[in-house]
């Protein structure tokens, strides 16, 4: 048992900056319970009463959590009632804890009976590495796909027996948070669960958590304060702290983990955090071989895996995707390494800022301010743009576009295009034109979002001409494919199905040529788009065949791909249009769609109608 001050009654996890004992240290710290003590006399009365009822169990572990350090714990022989001697026990950290915790746990279940609520996504059966994340911060921050949610989920599964309540709160938006809290209120069997009043649900769930360590005034069993209800709340993918501020529990027998791409998202509520890094080389190699079910003691396997990881930079999601690609194409790992090297050896430099955006949000305001200063003719001193400055603005604009901050993205592009013109007037190079093409590409996407399709088409034409003119020797298949997907969407929006089909087919060709990745998500998106065109043109047989091929490829790479929902939906539509109503295939497809939506959006109300728009919302905006 842990006894802490009210300020420490919510245990905040601290995740260490290394990667070997992260989960282990989390586990060690959180095997304790925390209760709030009001006064020293009240504390003594509780313990003395507990001893009288449990004479054979007179040793407990007391602990004080002192942020940002670990909990300080020490055993006390309660039968002696030597309160002054308690302070001398600090050297015996964690001694006798295991038995004390087990006794308390058993006692609690005998008195109150077992009770637990766990709202968790499916466990990752192939969770790998991350054995070294330990207690130093509450917030897991890092790039998308780096493994933040996986670490939080694995921790919850490993130690779910230590908690009576586990709540996984999807926190991408206010809507997803409200849906999670409504489900939590139902699971916790709280009174007055509201389908419409999100604030009422927040108050109810928060109240339940904060009361977890309170002692009922009428309780005849004084030990209930010791045997409270430990809980764990995970705020997953939180971007905006304002949506959780009025729900954040301030007390109770609880623990909180936040995952976010924004490193300081909950700084005002709790400043402790860790940046989750990419896999180390050993972890990356081990993870790749594990997903390929290959022997990690065979030297050739390790060499090929290291070769692949050299291109992927230890990014967990990229590693899993490559492993899925190798399995689906039945490639030996040596062949997979050669394919990856072939695809990436001549990539267009200046297109990525992958490794530099881990702290992107911290620097974003500085870049925006710098751009305003650059565009102000009266500011002093004047900024003279360099190639690196133009590249910084180009990548910052794309970053803002991905985040949906279109206004700031357009402002950054004004500065970036001005910098390009000044640089081009001095000299012209492939690097300068690569940056310009990227800025035009971003600007075209922003035009499309605002419905300025003519301007979008003009810019896409310019981008294509630049790439063909300056980069004939560079393997641009990925970027050309991506460009023609957007171009196909443009023609589709204008109902120009002939040119839309041509664009999608050309994009698909970029992925399906020898040495490319025909199972890439963008390639499957091309197939889906071609099926949509066929459906609009009334060619039902072609549409059905194309949708089925899309499903086949997606199943080979990722059976839970978010794209599967919309492809199955349109296949159902095509089958019904053909007159095949109420068939076994349609019923199976509809069930698979519902199961997928439930798995990807567990907070989604099951009564909500599944529409094309809902399924599109699950897919990356670039291929939507």
Image (cartoon, rainbow, N blue to C red):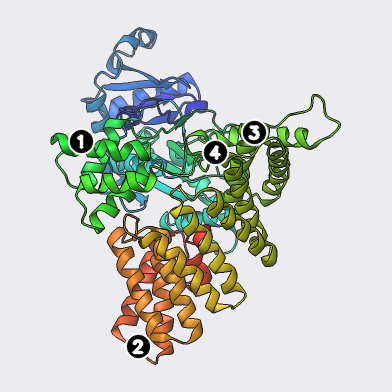
Query: Which structural element holds mark 4?
Result: loop
Nearer-N-terminus badge (1/4): 4
Categorize mark 2 by other alpha carbons within 10 Å: few (<14), some (14-19), many (20+): few
Q: Are marks 1 and 4 in contact (CB under 8 Å)?
A: no
**Residue under the image location 18 percent in, 39 percent down:** 301
Q: Nearer the viewer, mark 1 or mark 4?
A: 1
Q: Position of residue 539 (x, y in %)?
A: 43, 86
Residue 590 sits in which quadrant? Answer: bottom left
**Residue under the image location 33 percent in, 50 percent down:** 321
Q: Nearer the viewer, mark 4 or mark 3?
A: 3
Q: Quadrant of the N terminus?
A: top left
Residue 548 sits in which quadrant? Answer: bottom left
Q: Which residue is mark 4?
A: 262
Q: Mark 1 to mark 3: distance in Å?
A: 39 Å
> Is residue 606 something one can see in this rendering?
no
Q: Which residue is mark 3?
A: 389
Q: Which residue is mark 1?
A: 302
Q: Which residue is mark 2?
A: 582
Query: Which structural element holds mark 2?
Result: loop
Name of the residue lying farthest toward the right: 378
């Amino acid at each position: 048992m842990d006894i802490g001050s009210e300020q420490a009654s919510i245990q905040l996890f601290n995740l260490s900056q290394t990667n070997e004992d992260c989960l282990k240290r989390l586990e060690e710290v959180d095997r304790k319970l925390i209760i709030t003590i009001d006064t020293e006399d009240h504390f003594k009365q509780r313990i003395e009463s507990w001893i009288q009822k449990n004479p054979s169990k007179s040793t407990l572990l007391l602990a004080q959590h002192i942020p940002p350090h670990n909990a300080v714990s020490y055993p006390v022989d309660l039968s002696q009632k030597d309160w002054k001697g308690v302070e001398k026990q600090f050297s015996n950290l964690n001694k006798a804890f295991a038995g004390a915790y087990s006794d308390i746990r058993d006692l609690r279940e005998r008195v109150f009976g077992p009770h637990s609520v766990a709202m968790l996504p499916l466990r990752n059966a192939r969770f790998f590495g991350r054995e070294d994340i330990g207690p130093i911060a509450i917030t897991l921050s890092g790039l998308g796909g780096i493994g933040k949610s996986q670490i939080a989920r694995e921790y919850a599964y490993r130690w779910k027996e230590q908690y009576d309540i586990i709540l996984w709160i999807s926190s991408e938006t206010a809507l997803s948070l409200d849906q999670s809290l409504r489900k939590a209120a139902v699971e916790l069997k709280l009174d007055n669960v509201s389908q419409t009043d999100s604030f009422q649900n927040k108050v109810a769930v928060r109240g339940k958590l904060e009361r977890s360590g309170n002692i009922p005034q009428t309780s005849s069993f004084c030990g209930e304060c010791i045997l409270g209800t430990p809980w764990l709340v995970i705020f997953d993918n939180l971007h905006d702290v304002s949506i959780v501020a009025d729900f954040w529990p301030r007390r109770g027998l609880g623990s909180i983990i936040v995952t976010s791409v924004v490193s300081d998202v909950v700084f005002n509520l709790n400043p402790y955090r860790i940046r989750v890094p990419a896999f180390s080389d050993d972890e990356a190699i081990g993870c790749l071989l594990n997903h390929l079910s290959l022997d990690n003691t065979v030297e050739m396997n390790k060499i090929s895996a290291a070769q692949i990881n050299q291109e992927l930079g230890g990014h967990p999601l990229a590693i899993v995707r490559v492993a899925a690609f190798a399995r689906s194409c039945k490639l030996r790992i040596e062949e997979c390494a050669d394919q990856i090297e072939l695809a990436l050896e001549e990539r267009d430099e200046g297109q990525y800022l992958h490794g530099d955006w881990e702290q992107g949000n911290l620097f974003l305001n500085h870049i925006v301010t710098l751009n305003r200063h650059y565009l102000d003719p009266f500011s002093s001193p004047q900024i003279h743009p360099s190639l690196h400055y133009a590249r910084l603005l180009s990548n910052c604009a794309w970053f803002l576009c991905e985040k949906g901050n279109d206004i700031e993205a357009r402002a950054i592009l004004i500065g970036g295009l001005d910098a390009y013109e000044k640089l081009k007037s001095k000299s012209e190079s492939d690097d300068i034109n690569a940056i310009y093409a990227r800025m035009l590409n971003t600007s075209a996407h922003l035009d499309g979002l605002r419905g300025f399709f003519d301007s979008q088409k003009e810019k896409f034409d310019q981008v294509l001409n630049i790439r063909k003119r300056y980069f004939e020797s560079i393997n641009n298949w990925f970027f050309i494919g991506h460009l023609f997907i957007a171009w196909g969407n443009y023609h589709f929006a204008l109902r120009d199905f002939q040119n839309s089909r041509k664009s999608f087919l050309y994009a698909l060709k970029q992925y399906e040529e020898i040495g490319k990745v025909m199972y890439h998500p963008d390639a499957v998106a091309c197939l889906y788009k071609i099926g949509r065109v066929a459906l609009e043109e009334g060619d039902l047989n072609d549409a059905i065949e194309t949708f089925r091929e899309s499903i086949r490829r997606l199943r080979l790479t990722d059976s839970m791909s978010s794209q599967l929902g919309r492809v199955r939906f349109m296949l159902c539509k095509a089958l019904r249009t053909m007159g095949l109503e109420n068939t076994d295939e349609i019923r199976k497809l509809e069930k698979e769609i519902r199961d997928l939506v439930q798995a990807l959006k567990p907070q989604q109300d099951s009564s909500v109608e599944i529409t094309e728009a809902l399924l599109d919302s699950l897919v990356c905006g670039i291929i939507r």
